[in-house]
Amino acid sequence: MPKVLLINPPQRYFIGAMDFDTYVPLGLMSIAAVARGNCEVKILDCLVTEFEAKESQDFILYGTPPAEIEKVIQNYRPDIVGISVPFSAQLQSAIDVSRICKKVDPNIVVLFGGPDASVRYKEHLEAGYCDYCVVGEGERTFFEFVKASPSKDTLKNVEGVAYKLDDKVVYKPRGFIEQLDALPFPAYDLTDMNLYLKNKYLYLNRTPIHKNSITIITSRGCPFGCTFCSVKLHMGQKFRAHSPNYVIKHLKLLKEQYGITNFHFEDDNLLFDKPRFHQILDKIIEEKLHIRWDTPNGVHVNSLSFELLKKMKNTGCVSLTISIESGNQRVLSTVIKKPVKLDHTIEIVKHCRSLGIRLIAFYVIGFPGETIADAEETTELALRLFRVYNVSPRLLVATPLYGTELYKECLKKGFIRQDLTDRDFAVGTQIYGEPLISTGDFSKEDIKNIIYRYNQALKKEMMAYAMRNPIYALRKVIEKPENLKKVFKLGFINRT
């Protein structure tokens, strides 16, 4: 039986990035849960194992030191190593781990998987970063890969795996998993869950209820076509979901076995099937789960109503994240191609305020087709909704992620450099990220100036908020003095 090591590599945080936080590696746990019938499997999460933070040049490397990673590989002697590449900006860390594997034993078979490998598998294979790439959902693909053994002769019938053969990249697509309930729960038993639940970095900057918490994903795929989103490239546009009974069993397992009471629903479109979602909420009430939950990845505003929000509140929802994106309806409809009406969004904001549900909103500026005046409408809306309804703003700069419609448009029209690096994308995707796009309507410097003016105005709003809520502000600074610095550096309060 082959020995498999699944690795969540260290991460690089460049200057200007938000503070580091860690997460439970559900992707690797899900792959392990399916694969372990064919192999002996071990998970090495470099974000919690022998953890250290080391400054290097213009970034900080968080995670297991290279020497410790090498030691684990030497001691375990895996036949196959699967390395997660969750973001393009973190590719270099995956490359470094791959090199450690080959240093220990050149015969170790190295696979890359995750969103980046799904989009850029050809580039990675041609560069020699790895031996194989798992494209798209990994559970069944990896299971069959291990079963077939790493022989290119026997792999020719395995769908979802990309590899080089006679100097050509070979790839046979695999359809998406239709019946998600056929998948087992993630292999939580293959890790020490206390390393996460007692970790001070756990979802620290991701959610207001980060303590004693875990991400849960109840569906896959998003049918919408936002130009900047890369989800459909690795999870598809067809919505597929676990049944309400499966979801409730999963929640109960995590609560009863690990004492977890805070949950982060990270679906790409949690509310797409509203009858299903209502059933989940009804069952949470029937089972008397008494949990708290939020949606850090955001929910689609069109699916929200006062009645639904009220039921969500009654089942333990304490915080919602929505993607407002733009304060200009034309930009929303024709540039971003997001089917949302701003009037409805404002109504939802008012409902959340009246129900006492904390609200966080994403805004994005700097799209091709947008003007300076359009971008300023967005920042003005963000300031107004914070001032009037306490909606915490997260202002981002449009970043053309690999393979998206936005990326293709920017390349074709010369709106971005041809030689953008992974570091450029890492810095660009941060809060107040470095602009990468320049069009005839605005320059990168124009976007920087808008962000600067917005940030100065938001600081004043933050001070006014603190004056209106002095006890709250004092408590937050006493609990964590660096919160005061965050207010001025990042321009938002993480209300817990």
Image (cartoon, rainbow, N blue to C red):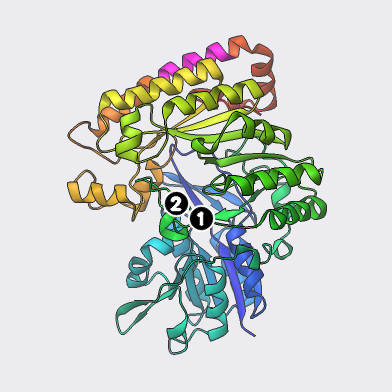
- Identified at 59% across, 34% down, the residue is 320
Can residue 197 be seen in the rendering of this structure? yes
Q: In the rendered view, tell whether residue 454 sits above or below residue 430.
A: above
- Magenta: main secondary structure equals helix
The one of 52 and 268 positioned closer to us in this rendering: 268
Can residue 417 be seen in the rendering of this structure? no
Q: Which residues are magenta?
A: 456-465
Q: Secondary structure at mark 1?
A: loop
- Identified at 69% across, 62% down, the residue is 185
Q: In the rendered view, tell whether residue 58 sits above or below residue 82.
A: above
State the image coordinates of residue 492 (x, y, percent, origin top left). 52, 26
Can you tell which quarter of the image residue 234 is in?
bottom left
State the image coordinates of residue 358 (x, y, percent, origin top left). 62, 28
Q: Secondary structure at mark 2?
A: loop
Residue type indicated by callout 2: Pro
Please name the residue that numbered disc 2 is placed on: 223
The one of 199 and 363 positioned closer to us in this rendering: 363
Residue type indicated by callout 1: Phe
Q: Mark 2–mark 1 contact, CB under 8 Å? A: yes
Magenta-span inclusion, residue 216:
no
Find the distance from the CA under tag 2 to the CA under tag 1: 6 Å
